């Protein structure tokens, strides 16, 4: 059957089937209640200006509002919604039935899925800062038969319903910090799921609250439209060569001319001399490198590049949309593209430029080998209030935010 002539029902069913298969390929198991919710909610009613085939693509978000060149609202990609809902259900003893949920960032579709998951004894409140977005969400929810979802227009940096707590708070906008209002509104032992930037890299963190300390239960690589309002934090980009940029998200100060001069010097390549199978998951390696680079007193930055710069050989990053890099006065070093062997195994590498390039590349591949030798450990995020004394922090890498002190540790996978 041609995709452009398939019915909405066919496309809907095919989307969920694909999501279940994609989960299995990643080594995940989609919870049956999440799959059932995805089959129940008609996604196309939340993307009325989009063709059916686009509405039911499993891998694509649907942009619903743009201001200038900036996307400010979207209906998230189904694969990401499914993974975050699974994170939430996995982190809550007994799952989602009967739970009271606050969603921050409203497109309507995710709120409808949550309404299916919490059932008749639960409740869903969805909030967004933009009146146009909440009006649209209300209309779409009503059209789909979910008029019992409470839609609120407000800045969720402040308490939405002061004095009320929720079993689950799920954020569907890219955040830089944890608002004190979210912790205050989270029930004891409640769960917070939030796409959070740490060292400029976004993960969906599912965290359980114990006292005033949310601690992560799971995390997934993701990307989201950035938070607006009082909780917004601007990502900065610095050009260091034509088509080559540094993404700065933790108020780093960088001399772009000095970095550009380092990058212009000859490249030194080092390899970890390891053999990894094709489906090896490396997402946690980048956060490991961020913590090790920071703990060693170097400056951690994220390298991004245009395809033209990669094709011209100016830069050879592992991923041009965001590769971990280390910077000091004598070297600029980053994780390089993989080296594939004849037997379909691959090696990890680092490229470096500057007077100390060989030592810098050697240090980075050493950190890669250390991650593998430790069993490819996964990061654990502890969130404590700003002002918490160092002596009260768990052992790990500390990242200070506006309202919080983040501590990243690692546990074996």
Image: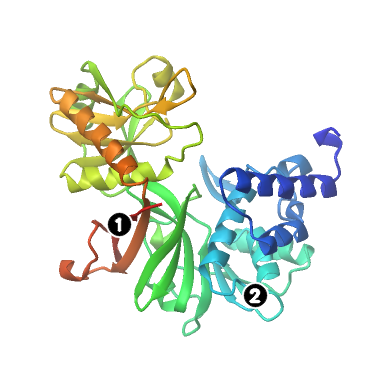
Q: Is residue 182 above or below residue 319?
A: below
Secondary element under disc 2, as helix, strand or loop, is: loop
Q: Residue at x 36, y 53 (%)?
A: 412
Report which quarter residue 383 is drawn in. Answer: bottom left
Q: Earlier in the sequence, mark 1 or mark 2?
A: 2
Q: How many marks on residues?
A: 2
Q: Residues within 10 Å of mark 2 (few under 14, many from 20)?
A: some
Please indicate, yes or no, whether residue 61 appears anywhere in the rendered image. Answer: no
Report which quarter residue 5 is drawn in. Answer: top right
Q: Nearer the viewer, residue 208 or 314?
A: 208
Q: Nearer the viewer, residue 395 or 55?
A: 395
Residue 97 disc label: 2
Mark 1 and mark 2: span between their CA atoms?
A: 32 Å
Left or right: residue 226 versus residue 21 is: left
x and y percentages locating residue 411 in the rendered image = 34, 56
Q: Nearer the viewer, residue 407 or 412?
A: 412
x and y percentages locating residue 346 in the rendered image = 42, 26
x and y percentages locating residue 202 in the rendered image = 42, 49
Left or right: residue 129 versus residue 215 is: right
Left or right: residue 243 versus residue 294 is: right
Q: Is residue 266 above or below residue 390?
A: above
Colour scheme of the rendered structure: rainbow
Q: Nearer the viewer, residue 268 or 192?
A: 268
Image quarter hosting the N terminus = top right
Q: Residue at x 22, y 67 (%)?
A: 393
Left or right: residue 39 versus residue 272 is: right
Q: Residue at x 72, y 41 (%)?
A: 54
Please indicate, yes or no, whether residue 312 appears anywhere in the rendered image. Answer: yes
To which residue does mark 1 refer?
A: 409
Q: Residues within 10 Å of mark 1 (few under 14, many from 20)?
A: some
């Amino acid at each position: 059957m041609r995709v452009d002539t398939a019915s909405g029902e066919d496309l809907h069913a095919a989307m969920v089937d694909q999501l279940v298969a994609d989960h299995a390929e990643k080594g995940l198991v989609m919870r049956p209640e999440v799959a059932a919710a995805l089959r129940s909610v008609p996604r196309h009613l939340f993307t009325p200006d989009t063709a059916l085939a686009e509405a039911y693509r499993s891998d694509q978000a649907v942009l619903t509002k743009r201001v200038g060149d900036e996307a400010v609202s979207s209906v998230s990609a189904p694969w990401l919604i499914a993974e975050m809902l699974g994170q939430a259900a996995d982190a809550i003893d007994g799952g989602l039935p009967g739970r009271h949920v606050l969603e921050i960032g409203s497109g309507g579709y995710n709120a409808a899925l949550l309404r299916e998951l919490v059932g008749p004894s639960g409740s869903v409140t969805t909030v967004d800062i933009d009146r146009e977005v909440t009006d649209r969400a209300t209309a779409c929810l009503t059209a789909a038969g979910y008029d019992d979802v409470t839609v609120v227009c407000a800045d969720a940096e402040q308490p939405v319903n002061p004095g009320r707590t929720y079993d689950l708070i799920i954020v569907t906008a890219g955040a830089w910090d944890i608002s004190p209002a979210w912790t205050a509104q989270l029930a004891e032992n409640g769960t917070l799921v939030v796409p959070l930037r740490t060292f400029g890299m976004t993960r969906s963190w599912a965290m359980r609250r114990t006292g005033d300390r949310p601690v992560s239960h799971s995390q997934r690589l993701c990307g989201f439209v950035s938070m607006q309002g009082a909780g917004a934090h601007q990502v900065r980009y610095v050009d260091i060569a034509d088509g080559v940029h540094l993404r700065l998200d933790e108020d780093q100060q960088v001399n772009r001319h000095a970095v550009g001069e380092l990058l212009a010097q000859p490249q030194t390549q080092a390899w970890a001399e390891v053999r990894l199978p094709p489906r090896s998951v490396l997402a946690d390696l980048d956060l490991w490198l961020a913590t090790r680079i920071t703990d060693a007193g170097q400056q951690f930055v994220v390298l991004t590049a245009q395809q033209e710069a990669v094709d011209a050989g100016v830069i050879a990053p592992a991923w041009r949309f965001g590769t971990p890099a280390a910077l000091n006065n004598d070297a600029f070093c980053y994780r390089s593209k993989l080296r594939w062997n004849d037997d379909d195994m691959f090696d990890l590498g680092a490229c470096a430029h500057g007077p100390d390039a060989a030592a810098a590349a050697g240090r980075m591949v050493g950190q890669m080998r250390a991650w593998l030798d430790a069993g490819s450990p996964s990061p654990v995020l502890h969130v404590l209030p700003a002002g918490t004394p160092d002596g009260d922090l768990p052992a790990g890498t500390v990242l200070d935010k506006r309202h919080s002190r983040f501590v990243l540790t690692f546990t074996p996978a």
